[in-house]
Image: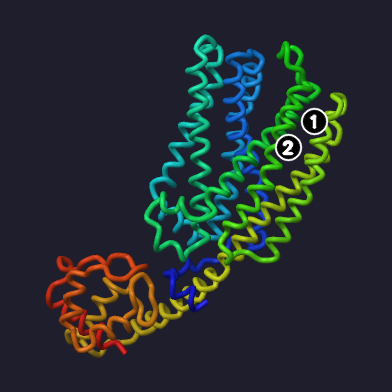
Amino acid sequence: MLLLQTSIPVPKDIPLPFPAPEWFLVTILIISFLVHIVFVNLMLGGSLLTLWCQIKGIKNKEYDTLAHEIAKTITVNKSLAVVMGIAPLLTINTLYTVFFYTANSLTGLMWIAIIPLVTVAFLLTYLHKYTWNTFSNNKPIHILIIAFACIIFMIIPLVFFTNVNLMLFPEKWGTIKGFMSALLLPNVFPRYLHFIFASLAVTGLFLFWYVGRKNYDFESIFNQLTRYEVKKKAYSLVLAASVSQFIIGPIVLLTLPSKGLGWNLILVIFTGAIISLPAIFYMYKAIVGKPENINKNFKIVVICLTITVVFMGSGRHIYRANTLNPHIKMISEKTQSFIKESEIARQESAKPQTAVSDKTDSNKGLEIFEQNCAACHAKDEKVVGPPIREMQTIYSNNPSGLKAWIKAPGKKREGYPQMPAFANKLSDSELNQLSNYILTIK
């Protein structure tokens, strides 16, 4: 804990109670996020599948028709993804306020850009959906519209995964210089790839159900493709994506920093993976089996994969808890210390003042230090810059040297950011008072 504390700045939290028990908020977070991510999967997977079918439909009109049928579902799933995303966003903000907002601020512009990106992507999907007949004789333009929507839909979760990954590692915050450096942290791309294949698997399963409904008049829509052929292709997509997860999943685990790994996480992840095996087996049997058996065991497939998703979502939270609990404890201690010091300060200020004379140089030095230096320097530990004890060791009996450094600092330590110059902010007298104060702190 001491090593962790000396390597990162420890902020204080907002001392407000949770609006509900923590276990309840965690439950809401896990469940609501899983519901949200399913519709995000359908939105992205549906867009990618529409693009693929429409390109294939240039030579085979039946696939263009299939692309149209899938495209009809994208805007609906998109709207549900947005609505279902409110609950997890609010709960993660409530449970992990300091961590989530810090990650957002460090990635800055890209996080804010999610709003216009989502707006543009949604407009493109509506434009694509309602201009199908308009561009019937100009398919390249129509395909380009859904292609741009797909690109944006793929960028948005990448930004989200980058932020969520960054919030787990406060010890990395001091090294982050915008979105691109956060993007290159370990585990971002493996998790993103895992999400892409999950989107294809969920969309394939959805398509199998969608075209298989009794009230879906398949035969009046398609002339050559059969219901069995589309179901078989949908199952093949689910199977391929699910098997790929057995390759990507271990890569995700191996790229996770070890500080959040534990037997509880390993047990949950491997249990979820094992539960998916019957689904993979039944899908394979349906694909290679007789056409009349394509629907057999579909419910078992859905149940097994749903349970797997729940286990994977729970594993995500377990890793987050394992990773952030030490930091949460440190922040809690800092917050309690801040509350105690604030109370003492209020009590002192309430006492009658006996002195009305001007402040001494020491008091002025303290005031200057608190206004300009306290955010980055502590007495005995590294915050953003080096501790005061280190300054006293270097500049003992040399206040003019310390003054010169404060006035125009350079950079000589790896792992420390460049200190701003105070030549134009503090007067010569104030620099003297500040230097003398730093060297006299006991």
Residue 118 drawn above or below residue 211: below
Q: Which residue is mark 1?
A: 287
Amino acid type of the residue that numbered disc 2 sits on in the rendered structure: Leu
Q: Nearer the viewer, residue 78 or 353?
A: 78
The quarter of the picture where residue 359 lies is bottom left
Quarter of the image that includes the C terminus: bottom left
Along the horizontal axis of the image, is 335 left or right of 46? Answer: left
Distance between mark 1 and mark 2 Cα atoms: 9 Å
Using the image, determine if residue 173 lies above or below residue 37: below
Q: Nearer the viewer, residue 44 or 342?
A: 44
Q: Position of residue 388 (x, y in %)?
A: 31, 81
1 or 2: tag closer to the N-terminus: 2
- In the image, taking residue 108 as reference, residue 336 lies left or right, namely right
Image vertical order of residue 273 relative to residue 7, above or below? above
Toward which corner of the image does residue 346 lie, by quadrant? bottom left
Q: Quadrant of residue 306?
A: top right
Residue 258 or residue 125, whichever sits in front? 258
Label 2 CA crowd tier, 10 Å (few <14, some 14–19, many 20+): many
Label 1: element kind: helix
Q: Residue at x 54, y 72 (%)?
A: 329
The amino acid type found where label 1 is placed reads Ile
Q: Which mark is residue 329?
A: none
Mark 2, residue position: 239
Q: Residue furthest left?
A: 428
